Image (spheres, rainbow, N blue to C red):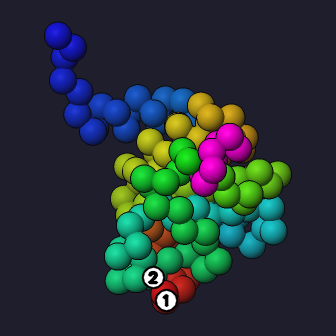
Amino acid sequence: MTEKIGFKELVADAEKRIETISAVAALKESISNNVVFVDLRDVREVKREGKIPQAFHCPRGLLEFWIDQESPYYNKIFGEDKRFIFYCNLGWRSALAADIAQRMGLKNVCHIDGGFEAWKQAGGAVEEK
């Protein structure tokens, strides 16, 4: 029988393989036209709290299907030659998502340490939904 592993261990393991950036670094990158912020939160979170301006909303449960070009749900945004900055509320889902995205072949991927909460604390703009 396999030993149980919790979300903290999964996130820590993912963070060994991915790039993690601070909210301050994300703010600096937000002015670039070569960056796509990917909001992984549930649609209810986005409606309730807003999002990073011009962020692309991709619910976490659909990510793998939207990245894979062989999927009938493929989203062409993931075929663009851009830097993808993933975020969620606190940075846990985005760490796991960045890891999966890299494993699926997406290049130039990172996630925001502390997520949307850190973004707001760093003075990042919020677009109301």
How many numbered marks appear?
2
**Residue 19 x %, y %:** 59, 41
Badge number at residue 48: none
Q: Going by the image, does 25 lie left or right of 61?
A: right
Residue 18 appears in which quarter of the rendering?
A: top right
- Mark sitting earlier along the chain (2/1): 2
Q: Nearer the viewer, residue 73 or 89?
A: 73
* Segment tinted magenta in the rendering: 66-73
Verify whether residue 90 appears in magenta. Answer: no
Whole-percent x, y for residue 74 in the image: 65, 52
Residue at image coords 54%, 45%: 64
Q: Which residue is mark 2?
A: 50
Is-magenta flag for residue 71? yes
Gap in angstroms between the C-alphas marked 2 and 1: 4 Å
Is residue 21 at all visible to an observer of this figure?
A: no
In the displayed structure image, the side of residue 8 where residue 24 appears, left or right: right
| Residue 58 higher or lower than 54, as above or below | above
**Could you tell me what secondary structure mostly forms the magenta stretch?**
loop
Secondary element at image label 1: loop
Residue at 38% x, 67% y: name it.
Answer: 42
Query: Camera-side residue: 44 or 35?
Result: 44
Image coordinates for residue 54, horizontal then vertical, percent: 65, 77
Which is more toward the observer, 56 or 124? 56
- Is the residue under label 1 in contact with that under label 2 (CB below 8 Å)? yes
**Of residues 104 and 21, which is closer to you in this image?**
104
Q: Amino acid at mark 1?
A: Glu
The N terminus appears in which quarter of the rendering? top left
* Residue 50 on image: x %, y %: 45, 82
User: Would you name the residue on which mark 1 appears?
Assistant: 128
Query: Height in image: 66 above or below 9?
Result: below
- Residue at screen point 30% across, 31% down: 9
